[in-house]
Image (cartoon, grey):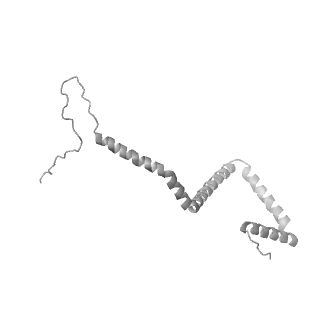
Amino acid sequence: MQEPEFTETKSKETTVTEINSQTGTITKLQPPAQSQDQWLKYGEQISSFLATLPEYLGSFFNEYKQPLVSVGLIVGSIVAVKVLLAVLDALNDIPLVAPTFELIGIGYSAWFVYRYLLKASTRQELTSEITTLKSQVVGKNVPES
């Protein structure tokens, strides 16, 4: 087996030819002038990008306003549901709160049945209220049946 050959590459960095070889003295090496030019070039690119960023973001938001609002509403509703579930779970851990809420729910259901579902006239009243609510939400007149 042959050993791989290595070739020495020379870097493009500038070298200082005169280095003080006396002991006890420190020689200052100056950074190459080319790196300063590169930093200035990068700085100009960054500043031009930051200058056009507000205009770019404004045009992006104007172009994609509806999808961004939809995504925001979806994310907001997911967060709201998670918070609501956490609050309900915390309330469920408190003694006597869960049975109290169950009794309140049973009582309200009984009142609703007594108020709206036992008589034909009250059922018609409930139907008209639901129809009115539909027309308010949808925005057009829904025919009553």
- Write the residue at 68% across / 51% down: 92
Name the residue: 25% across, 26% down.
Answer: 26
**Vertical relation: 135 (above or below) 104:** below
Please state the horizontal and vertical placement of residue 128, each as a whole percent of the image: 82, 70
Q: Nearer the viewer, residue 18 or 5?
A: 18
Image quadrant in which you'd find residue 127: bottom right
State the quadrant of the C terminus.
bottom right
Q: Position of residue 16 (x, y in %)?
A: 21, 35
| Quadrant of the image containing the N terminus | bottom left
Q: Residue at x 79, y 68 (%)?
A: 132
Give 18 or 131, whichever is nearer the viewer. 18
Left or right: where does residue 20 sit relative to residue 79? Answer: left
Q: Residue furthest bottom?
A: 145
From the viewer's perspective, is 126 left or right of 60? Answer: right
Residue 71 in picture, x, y percent from top left = 57, 59
Q: Quadrant of residue 118?
A: bottom right
